[in-house]
Image: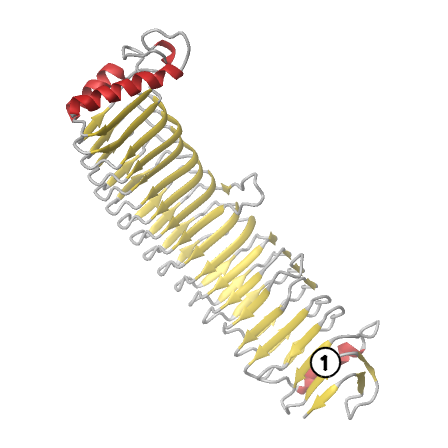
Amino acid sequence: MKHIFLLITLTIMTISCSSDGADGIDGANGINGTGGNNGLGRLVFSGDITNEDAAKIIAENTGKNTHTLIIKNTTSLTTIDISEISTLVELEVIGNEELHTLTIANLESIFGGAKIQTNVALTSINFSKLTTVGSFSISGSPLLESLSFPSLIDSKNILSISNLDNLTTLDLSSLVSANLIQINRNQKLPTIDLPKLTALREASISDNIAIETINLPVLKILEASENEDNDDGLFIGRNTNLIAIYLNVLTSIDMLTIRNNENLTTINLDKLVSLGSVSFGSNPKITTISFPNITTIKNINFSENDLVTNIAFPDLKTLESNLTITGNNILETLSFPMLTSIGTENRYSFRIRDNMIRNITFPNLETVNANTINIGEDLLETVDFPKLASFSVLNIDSTVLLNSVTLSSIQNFERLDLNSSGKLSTAAIDGILNRLVNITPVITNKTIWLSSKKHIIYYYVFKFHPGSIGSKGYSCYGCHFTG
C-alpha cells in the first residue's frame, strides 16, 4: 500500500507542476519537472508515509520552483526537515497524528498563507529565518510549549496564534508591522511582548487565562482600514490574570475595547490623541479612566467597572454617537468640561445610570441628538446643563431629592420627564418653570412631567405661557394638575 501511495503522490506532483510554466525541461521554469536542481512546484505528504519516504521525496523533488508544501493527515510521519526552501506561496500542516518536529530552517518568506492546525503531537517548529508572511495561523497543537519567530518583521494579513494549551514562550521580538494579530485561548502563556511593533491595524487578545502583562511599548498607531465600514482596533478581553497593559506611546486608534479582565489594574493612554470608539466593561480592579488629549470621539461605553471612581475627558468637544456610563458601582465623578455636542442623528443614545454619582455637570453641552437623555442615579442631587438648548427627551430619576436641575438654555425639545421617585425641590421646579415660560416662541405640543416633594405633578401638553394658576403664576392649555 505504501509504494502505491508514493507512486500516486509522485504522479500528482509531476502533473501539477506542468501548469507552472511553459517549455520547461526537467523542472526548469516549473514544468515537466521530475525533481533535479529546480524541484517540483507542489509537494504533498499524506497517508502512511514514513520519515524515510519523506526524506527521499524532499531530496529528489525540492528546489527553487517549489512553491507549495502540504503535509496533511499523515499517520506515521514524525519528523520533516526541508532546508532547500527559502520561499513558499502556501504551507499547510494539518491533522498529522505523529508529527512532532517541523523544520524549514532557511524559509524566509511565505507570500500567501500558512496553516498549522490540529497536529496533536507537535512539539517543535523551526522557522528561524522567516521574515515576511502573508497569513499565518497556528492552532490545535496541545504539546507545543515554545513558538519562536525571531526574524519575523512583517505580517501582511492575519497572524493567528490560538488554542495552544501548553504554550509558555512566544517570540515575536523582531515584528515591526502587522495587519491583524489574534492571540487567543492559550491557557499557559504568561506574557505578550512585542518590543518593536510600531504599526498595526487590528488585534484581538482574549481568553488567555495565564497572561499577566501585554507589552506594546513602541506601538504608535493602530491604523484604520480603507474600508470605512470596518471598526479596526484593539480588543483585549477575558484574560483572567492580566494585570497591566503597556501602550505608553500609542497616539491613534479607531476602536479600543477592554472588557472582562478580572485583575487588570494598569493601562496608560496619556499619549492618545486620536480615538474612534472606546469601551471599558467588567474590569473590576481599574480605578481611574482618563483620556486627557481626546477632542473628538464616536462612541463611549463604560460599564460595570467596580472600582472606577472617576471618568475624565477634559478636552473632549464632540461625541459623534453614543454615551453609555452604567453600573460602575462606586463611580462618583464625571468630567466632560468642554463637550458641546452629542450625536448626529436621533437614533443614538445618552445613558448615565446605576452608578454612585451625586452631581452631573455638562457645563458646555449645547446639543444632544439622541432618542432620550436617560439619567438615573440613586444618590443624584444636582443636574447641571446650563447651555443645553436642543434635545428630544430628557428623563432624570433619583431616589433622593433633586435639589437643583439647571436647564437655563433649553429651547427645542419634545418631552421633559422629571417625575423622579425622589422628587424635586421647590427651587428646582421653580427654576424649570421660569425657563419654560420664557422660551420664545411659546412652546407648544410638549409633554412635561414634574414631581415635587409634596407630590404635585404638572402635566403640560399644548401651549404654555405666563398667566395665573394658583400661586405659581403660570397657565397652559391642555394641562393636568394633581396633588
Nearer to us in this view, 230 or 332? 230
Confirm whether residue 423 shows in the render. Answer: yes
Front one among 130 and 296: 130
Secondary structure, mark 1, is helix
Q: Position of residue 69 (x, y in %)?
A: 31, 25
| Above-or-below relation of 412 to 219 | below
- Left or right of 124? Residue 393 is right
Q: Kindly indicate the quadrant of the structure image that contains residue 156.
A: top left
Question: Badge 1 is on which residue?
Answer: 431
Could you tell me which residue is drawn at 19 percent across and 22 percent down? Answer: 4
Task: Give the amino acid type for the residue marked by disc 1 in the picture.
Answer: Gly
Question: Badge 1: few (under 14), some or many (20 or more) residues near its Cα, within 10 Å?
Answer: some
Lateral position of residue 348 relative to residue 101, left or right: right
Tell me, yes or no, if residue 195 can be seen here: no
- Nearest to the observer: residue 61 or residue 280: 61
- Residue 158, horizontal then vertical, whole percent: 42, 38
Residue 268 vertical placement versus 331 (above, below): above
Q: Is residue 45 left or right of residue 295?
A: left
Residue 404 placement (x, y as % from top left): 64, 79
- Determine the image quadrant of residue 168: top left
Residue 266, given in percent of the width and then of the height, sits at 40, 56
Q: Is residue 372 above or below residue 74?
A: below
In the image shown, does 462 or 315 lie closer to the viewer?
A: 462
